[in-house]
Amino acid sequence: MRTVIRTIVAVSWVFAMQGGVAFAEQAAGGQPAMDPAKQAAMEKMQQLGGPSEGHKVLEPFVGAWTYTAQWWMAPEAPPESMTGSATNSLVFGGRFLKQEIRGEAPGQPPFEGVGYTGYDNIRKEYQSVWLDNMATGIMWATGQFDPSTNALTTQGDFSCPMTGETHRKSRSVWKVVDQNHTIYESDMSGPDGREFKAMEIHYTRAQ
């Protein structure tokens, strides 16, 4: 919300200044023209606020997918499994990757989740949020893409309904295997503070 307000204020300021310059030139009998400083400010804002090379990293994840998943409640716990489908699309002019997930697990209600991942041109980092019908909190994470491994690695925390922790640490790696396969792995902190594999998802392109 703060970002929206900040952007609206910036745009309003630029257009207000442009309007003042145009009015003055019209009063003098000249043609309306944009002040060079204001034009440069507008161009910079458009550049920083639009899709960049960093956003191209998200393109391989776009499409319809099926998946098989395993997760572990604790380091020594046996894995549980789930299958489902995912639809990933670029939204807001290619600025964000939207994930819509559905799944089925034995003895569990249907799973639904939605996430957004984007690249912040100013901070030069990837940012993601995730929310689903298994918790009331929102997962937040930031990270970088490594072209040598073709993987997006993010770190963050979340409020965990399994343990009651207000800030449980997590680290996730989403790797592009090829154009039809990706693998997502997530590690979490255990009772001793050390990481353990908490989830592994194998995605296969459906179309």
Image: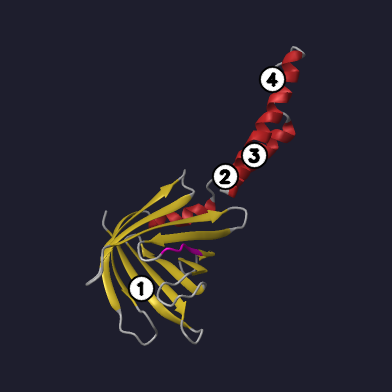
Please tell me whether residue 176 belongs to the stretch shown in magenta: no
Q: Spatial distance from mark 1 to mark 2, Cα to Cα?
A: 35 Å
Mark 3–mark 2 Cα distance, whole angstroms, equals: 9 Å
The answer to whether residue 14 is left or right of residue 53 is right
Which residue is the site of mark 4?
A: 32
1 or 2: tag closer to the N-terminus: 2
Which is closer to the viewer, label 4 or label 2? 2
Question: What type is the residue that disc 2 sits on?
Answer: Val
The amino acid beneath tag 3 is Val
State which tag comes first along the sequence, 1 or 4: 4
Q: Is residue 167 above or below residue 63?
A: below
Position in image of residue 164 (x %, y %): 45, 75
- Comparing labels 3 and 1, the label whose residue is closer to the camera: 3
Left or right of 132? Residue 205 is left
Name the mark nearer the viewer: 3 or 4: 3
Judge whether residue 30 can be spotted in this image: no
Q: Position of residue 161 (x, y in %)?
A: 41, 72
Q: Residues within 10 Å of mark 2 (few under 14, many from 20)?
A: few
Report the span colored magenta.
Answer: 136-140
Where residue 188 appears, as percent x and y from the top left, is: 45, 77
Question: Which residue is disc 3 drawn over?
Answer: 9
Circles 3 and 1, Cβ within 8 Å, touching? The answer is: no
Other residues around mark 4 within 10 Å, as few (<14) / some (14–19) / many (≥20): some
Earlier sequence position, callout 4 versus callout 2: 2
Task: Choose the circle earlier in sequence order: 3 or 1.
Answer: 3
The residue where tag 2 is placed is: 4
| Residue name at image x 34 percent, y 85 percent | 77
| Residue 41 left/right relative to 108 | right
- SS for tag 3? helix
Q: Residue at the spot x=57%, y=60% of the render?
A: 125
Query: Badges 1 and 2: C-beta atoms under 8 Å apart?
Result: no
Q: Quadrant of residue 102?
A: bottom left
